[in-house]
Amino acid sequence: MRVTVGQLKKLVREAKVKASPEYTAKERVREALQELVADQVVAGAVKDQATLAKYFSDMDMALNALKLIPLEVWSKLAKK
């Protein structure tokens, strides 16, 4: 199979994006959230697609509430 220069350029661009600090940070967040959801499935709190959708809705609501907390409060909580 022959690989064109365009295909090689595309592969290099994709590798750069995957290795970027921004992408890596987003992947760490996604992995942490994925583990949280998996834990809820294992614990039996999420049993079907409907409860999964409800759980994601609850996560969205909680995240929106957490966004309102200033960094100073997070810093104080981290010191405890």
Image (tube, grey):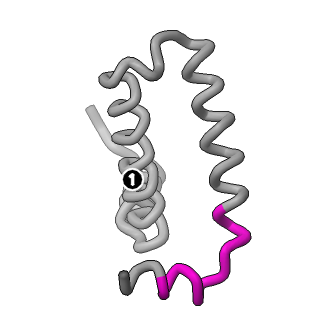
Q: Nearer the viewer, residue 14 or 10?
A: 14
Instruction: Tell me if residue 11 comes above or below residue 47 in the rendering.
Output: below
Q: Which residues are magenta?
A: 66-76
Residue 24 is one of the magenta-drawn residues: no
Residue at x 39%, y 41% (from the top left corner): 36
Residue at x 39%, y 53% (from the top left corner): 11
Q: Residue furthest left?
A: 1
Residue at x 48%, y 86% (from the top left corner): 75
Whole-percent x, y for residue 31 in the image: 37, 48
Q: Nearer the viewer, residue 65 or 31?
A: 65
Q: Nearer the viewer, residue 40 or 24?
A: 40
Classify residue 60 as left or right of residue 28.
right
- Name which quarter of the figure residue 78 lies in: bottom left
Instruction: Tell me if residue 52 comes above or below residue 56 in the rendering.
Output: above
Residue at x 46%, y 79% (from the top left corner): 77
Report which residue position mark 1 lands on. 11
Whole-percent x, y for residue 19 in the image: 35, 66
The answer to whether residue 24 is visible is yes
Q: Magenta stretch: dominant SS?
A: helix
Residue 71 is one of the magenta-drawn residues: yes
Classify residue 46 as left or right of residue 72.
left
Quarter of the image that includes the N terminus: top left
Q: Nearer the viewer, residue 39 or 19?
A: 39
Whole-percent x, y for residue 2 in the image: 30, 38
Secondary element under disc 1, as helix, strand or loop, is helix
Whole-percent x, y for residue 38 in the image: 36, 31
Name the kind of residue labelled 1 in the image.
Leu
The answer to whether residue 9 is visible is no
